[in-house]
Amino acid sequence: MRFSILINCHNQANYIDECILSTLNQNYENFEVIVADSSDKKLNLEKFKLHKNFKYIHIEKSSQHSEMNQMHKIEQGFKEASGDYICLLDGDDKFSDKKLNKLAECIKSSDIIFNQDIPFLLYENDKKISLKIKKYKKNNIFRKLVIDWPQIYGTSSITIKKNILKSFFNKSDPYKWKYLAIDVQLILFCSINFKVSNQLDQITFKRKHDRNLGDLYLNIFSKNFWKRRKCQHDFYYFLKKKRTYNFDYFITYLISIFL
C-alpha cells in the first residue's frame, strides 16, 4: 500500500521544515511527499530534495480566497500523486512518525474510504491538548432537529482513497463554494456518498495560532460566519439534490436576507 502525503503551504516558512521532517521520518517505507507551495517567495527546500520520494512544486496564488487557493494547491499536488491513499497536511501542522504505519494497519482491517483521525492541538508554547469530541454531533435528535453535519477535525487529519478524491474534484464543483475549505467539502461529500470513519487519534498535530484559516469564521456575530454557513447549506443541497430543513437552515437563511 502506497501513501501520497500532500503538503499545501502558503507563507509558512517558520513551520515547513518541521512539517516535512515529520513526514520523511515515518516508520513506514512506501510513501511519497509532495509539497505544493504558493508562498510569495519560493521556499528553500534543497536539503529535502535528496530524498527520492520528495517533490516540490511552486504554484502561483490562484485566488483571493484562501480556501480556493488551498484547494488549487491540493488539486495540483494530487495530479502528481501515485499513492493508493492520499494524506492531506497543512504546512504548519505535522504528523507523528507512526501515522502511516497505523493508517496501513487500520486500512488492512477495515475497508476505509475516508478517515479523519482525531488530532492533538499544538500551541505556540508546544502545549499539546487533545481535540474535544462534540458528543451532541452524534445525537440523533440533535442531528434531525438542529443540524446533521459531522464534526470536522481539520485538513491534516484527512486520509482518503485516491480514486475518491478524484471523484470529488470531478463531481462536486469545489471552486464554486468559495467560503468552504477542502476539509469541509470533503467530509460532506464523503458522508453523503460513502462511509466515513473516525479511527485513530494522536497521530496528527494541528497547530493553533492566530493565522488558522478557519478562525476567520468563528465569530457568530460576523458576516463571514453566516456567509460560510449559507454556503455550507447550499453545498449540502448541491450534493444531496434536496434540502434538509432544520433549525440551523431556517436561522441561516433568515439572517442571510439581511447580509
Image (cartoon, rainbow, N blue to C red):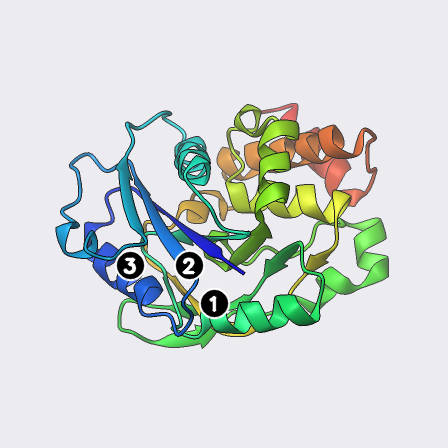
Q: CA distance from mark 3 to mark 1?
A: 14 Å
Q: Could you tell me which quadrant the C terminus lies in? A: top right
For the question of whether residue 199 can be seen, the reply is no
N-term-proximal mark, 1 vs 2: 2
Q: Amino acid at mark 1?
A: Leu
Mark 3 lies on a secondary structure that is helix
Q: For mark 3, what is the residue?
A: 20
Q: Amino acid at mark 2?
A: Phe
Residue visible at 55% across and 52% down? 84
- Marks 1,2: beta carbons within 8 A: yes
Using the image, tell me which numbered label, if any, was put on residue 100. 1
Q: Amino acid at mark 3?
A: Ile
Q: For mark 2, what is the residue?
A: 31
Q: Quadrant of residue 172?
A: top right
- Mark 2 surroundings: few (<14), some (14-19) or many (≥20) residues within 10 A: many
Name the one closer to the observer, 250 or 136.
136
N-term-proximal mark, 3 vs 2: 3
Residue 138 vertical position relative to residue 126 in the rendered view, above or below: above
Percent x, y of residue 110: 71, 67
Residue visible at 81% across and 42% down? 246
